[in-house]
Amino acid sequence: MPTTVAFAHATGFCGGVWRPVAAALHASFESLVWDFPCHGSAPKLEHPIDWWDLGTFALAQVAGAGFPLIGVGHSMGGAALLMAEIRAPGTFAALLLIEPIVFPPPFGEYEGPQTRRARKRRSQFSSREEARTNFADKLPFSSWHPAALDGYVDCGLIETARGVELACRPEDEAAIYRAATQHGVWDLLGIVDSPVTILAGSSSDTHTVDFVSDLSSQIPNCEYEIVPGTGHFLPMEMPETVAERIEQL
């Protein structure tokens, strides 16, 4: 029986960014990919946004998936998969979480640089070609695997009368960031019984070694790895590494 791998993307992106990871997997793996609400082709959410709705959405996407099921989540997607497992224990045979957005209390609204940058993000382009050229010259996209960038250009933009625009609107991205520290998953991590592996980049500006060690200690069956030469965008920069860790599970 093939192993199904459910891929959950980060804030502001879409399922297409997982293409090079899925392509690097052995043929015995089947990939399940989706766009979260406010991203790609998925519906919008009313504000204020509750991250638990993202966890519920993830749970609905994997309903009926073949078992064993491995959940692979990046950033927001990692938090959403933890929420899905907390709400329905045993959904995943294992979880591979790449810098999941799960922080300790106090829990409350977040207003930081990510929120401010999201509001100012350029959202309109004359074509997908212009958008790809624009992204390719700027961080973090300039360090991505080309197939990950192509995936983002394909599903992270929608057609308009004037060209294309970001599927994840700046106001939605900012609202998601604003709610990122409200969900309280940290206090529920002891419920997670499935084996969990956490990956973080050595140059991450959010998940330091000490923080990842503390985070992993909250989960009963968890190990972690710090991957050198990358940061928060590890799945898009080193897809083969992520694929290797999936196969090791």
Image (cartoon, rainbow, N blue to C red):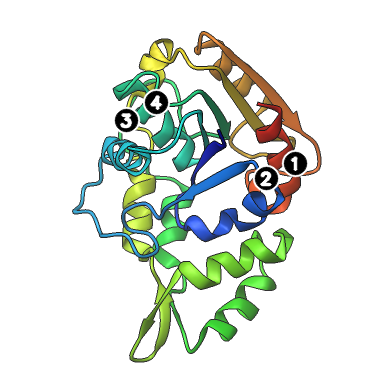
Q: Which numbered disc, 3 or 1, marks the residue closer to the eye?
A: 1
Rendered-image quadrant of the C terminus: top right
Three-letter code for the amino acid on which mark 4 is drawn? Thr
Give the CA distance from mark 4 to mark 3: 20 Å
Cα distance, mark 3 to mark 1?
30 Å
Label 2 sits on what residue type? Leu
Mark 2 element type: helix
Q: Which of marks 3 and 4 precedes in the sequence?
A: 4
> What is the x, y in percent for residue 119?
39, 62
The amino acid type, in three-letter code, at marker 3 is His
Which kind of residue does numbered mark 1 sit on? Thr
Quarter of the figure with residue 129 = bottom right
The residue under label 1 is 241
Report the mark closest to the observer, 4 or 2.
4
Q: Is residue 198 left or right of residue 231?
A: left
Residue 74 shows up from this direction: no
Q: Residues within 10 Å of mark 3 (few under 14, many from 20)?
A: many
Q: Secondary structure at mark 1?
A: helix
Q: Earlier in the sequence, mark 2 or mark 1?
A: 2
Residue under pointer 3: 183
**94 on left or right of 186:** right
Of pointers 2 and 3, the one earlier in the residue sequence: 3
x and y percentages locating residue 153 in the rendered image: 54, 72
Residue under circle 2?
Answer: 234
Residue at the image position 75 percent from the left and 41 percent from the top: 241
Q: Are marks 2 and 1 in contact (CB under 8 Å)?
A: yes
Q: Nearer the viewer, mark 1 or mark 4?
A: 4
Residue 244 on image: x %, y %: 74, 37
Can the viewer see residue 180? yes
Tag in front: 2 or 3: 2
Mark 2 vs mark 3, CA separation in Å: 24 Å
Percent x, y of residue 216 = 57, 17
